[in-house]
Image (cartoon, rainbow, N blue to C red):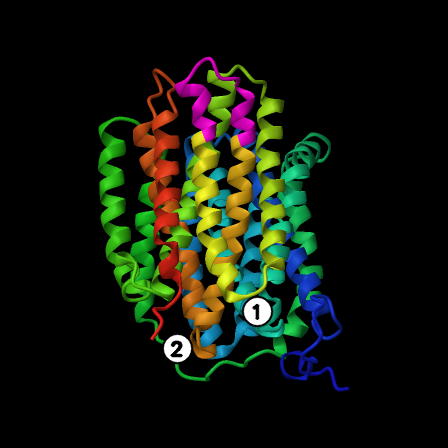
């Protein structure tokens, strides 16, 4: 049998994700996702040492905000490139820009140069996030997409568990620059595994690129940056930044996301909106959970870190469970179940705060439920998106999915900054917001399927 075209030549009964013809693509995707995950976790761990070495503490927050802002532009560009030129060319661009950003940051002589490198990393990772979904999704048959996105979730687990310790070791033994340079050394390997397979995927429609959306992407990027800045401030300045960023993001979202997204129209628009809601619920809760555990319950940083890792593991478990669910009717029931479980888990996390007589370990139980619930629902949204997208629109729709993730998460983190009171260190309002987002997602989730005719 000719394996040159894995999309059309693979036998219908072949249910193995790593079957010949797509093995390299899957291995390359795992390597690339693990690399992106390690980069994000390791840089967060090493950034205090970086800022101290480069005397750049005033630009500390900007080193993270710049990455988030430029990733929004990268997502939009990638959607256009995948649909018009194919995922292969878009992946080439994303890998090249991401690698350049790593090298600029790794050899940066000053903090402003490092921030520029971080901005390039954000641009490249935004492109790669879209091309992985589209390119590998075209190589792997649709029946295996639940397993594919479960694999994507699992690729985050090991970096999440060992990333902080490994980053600390790199900083201690070789210096902070190797946090960036070590990742850069892995990029060519991931490219060698992934790119040849993507080249055999859809070449795109060949139509001219429409760059009109780029101006809205820039506006969305500015909004995301302001929302991120609001999460780093307190008082009036935080409120003004949040309001300006929210308005900019909302205006851009109306142009960049599918029509009907903001009103949860049935089908694809609701899928895109749900991704933003559940990602925002998790991001805002995860950012403040260590503070709750250490400041309110008196846990050590090590114990808080273990709690976060437990959530990552159960996320992977939930993803594996949804991959085994067969039939559209069962998946219709599982999606709202996942969101409801995440909301219930967050309620359990808050229970020892609301009732002091309850043991603090209930927060750990609740967080494992949050991870399990999001693991059940998060990959299903990716599967649904590709199922509801014509081949020539998979890039644009995947871009919308990840834009929703970035913009709503930025808004939630900015809102969390406004809700959190540094004086009392009370994080309950933030957790209530996260719980509400997950609960609303559970209510809206039946609309993720188009209305039956």
Q: Is residue 268 positioned above or below 294 on the image?
A: below
Q: Is residue 35 visible from the viewing direction of this image?
A: no
Q: Which tag is nearer the camera, tag 1 or tag 2?
A: 1
Q: Position of residue 268 (x, y in %)?
A: 38, 66
Which corner quadrant holds the C terminus?
bottom left
Q: Residue at x 56, y 43 (%)?
A: 372
Quick one: 428 or 224, which is closer to the camera? Answer: 428
Q: Is residue 275 positioned above or below 198 on the image?
A: above
Dominant secondary-structure state across the stretch colored magenta = helix
Seen from this angle, which residue lies furthest bottom? 1
Instruction: Please provide the residue range marked out in magenta.
Output: 348-365
The image quadrant that residue 398 belongs to is bottom left
Q: Secondary structure at mark 2?
A: loop
- Mark 1 highlights which residue? 137
Q: Residue at x 42, y 37 (%)?
A: 284
Q: Secondary structure at mark 1?
A: helix
Q: Is residue 291 positioned above or below 7 on the image?
A: above
Q: In the image, is residue 352 part of the stretch drawn in magenta?
A: yes
- Mark 2 highlights which residue? 209
In primary-sequence order, the first of circles 1 and 2 is 1
The image quadrant that residue 202 belongs to is bottom right
Q: In the image, is residue 429 part of the stretch drawn in magenta?
A: no
Q: Residue at x 68, y 44 (%)?
A: 158
Q: Position of residue 194 (x, y in %)?
A: 66, 67
Q: Residue at x 46, y 17 (%)?
A: 296
Q: Is residue 30 visible from the viewing direction of this image?
A: yes
Neighbours of disc 2 within 10 Å: few (<14), some (14-19), many (20+): few
């Amino acid at each position: 049998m000719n394996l040159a075209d894995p999309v059309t030549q693979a036998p219908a009964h072949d249910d193995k994700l790593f079957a010949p013809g797509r093995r390299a693509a899957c291995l390359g995707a795992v390597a690339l996702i693990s690399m992106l995950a390690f980069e994000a976790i390791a840089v967060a761990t090493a950034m205090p040492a970086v800022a101290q070495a480069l005397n750049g503490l005033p630009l500390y927050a900007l080193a993270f905000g710049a990455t988030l802002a430029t990733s929004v532009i990268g997502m939009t560009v990638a959607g256009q490139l995948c649909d018009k030129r194919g995922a292969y060319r878009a992946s080439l661009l994303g890998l090249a820009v991401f690698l350049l950003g790593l090298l600029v940051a790794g050899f940066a002589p000053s903090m402003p140069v490092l921030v520029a490198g971080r901005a390039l990393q954000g641009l490249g990772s935004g492109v790669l996030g879209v091309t992985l979904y589209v390119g590998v999704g075209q190589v792997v048959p649709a029946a295996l997409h639940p397993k594919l996105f479960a694999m994507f979730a699992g690729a985050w687990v090991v970096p999440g568990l060992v990333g902080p310790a490994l980053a600390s070791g790199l900083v201690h033994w070789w210096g902070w620059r190797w946090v960036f340079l070590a990742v850069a050394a892995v990029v060519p390997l991931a490219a060698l595994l992934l790119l040849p397979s993507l080249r055999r995927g859809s070449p795109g429609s060949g139509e001219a690129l429409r760059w009109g959306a780029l101006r809205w992407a820039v506006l969305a990027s500015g909004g995301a940056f302001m929302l991120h800045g609001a999460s780093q401030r307190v008082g009036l300045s935080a409120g003004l930044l949040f309001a300006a960023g929210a308005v900019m993001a909302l205006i851009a979202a109306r142009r960049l996301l599918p029509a009907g997204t903001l009103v949860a129209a049935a089908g694809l628009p609701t899928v895109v909106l749900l991704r933003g809601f559940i990602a925002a619920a998790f991001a805002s809760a995860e950012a403040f959970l260590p503070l709750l555990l250490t400041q309110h319950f008196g846990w050590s940083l090590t114990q808080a870190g273990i709690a976060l890792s437990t959530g990552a593991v159960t996320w992977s478990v939930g993803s594996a469970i949804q991959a085994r669910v067969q039939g559209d009717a069962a998946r219709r029931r599982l999606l709202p179940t996942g969101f409801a479980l995440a909301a219930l888990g967050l309620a359990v996390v808050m229970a020892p705060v609301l009732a002091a007589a309850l043991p603090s370990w209930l927060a750990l139980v609740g967080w494992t439920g949050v991870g399990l619930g999001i693991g059940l629902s998060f990959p299903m949204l990716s599967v649904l998106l590709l199922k509801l997208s014509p081949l020539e629109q998979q890039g644009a729709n995947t871009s919308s999915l990840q834009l929703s993730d970035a913009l709503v998460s930025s808004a939630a983190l900015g809102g969390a900054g406004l809700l959190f009171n540094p004086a009392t260190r009370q994080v309950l309002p933030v957790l209530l917001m996260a719980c509400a987002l997950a609960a609303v997602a559970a209510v809206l989730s039946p609309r993720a399927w188009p209305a039956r005719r």
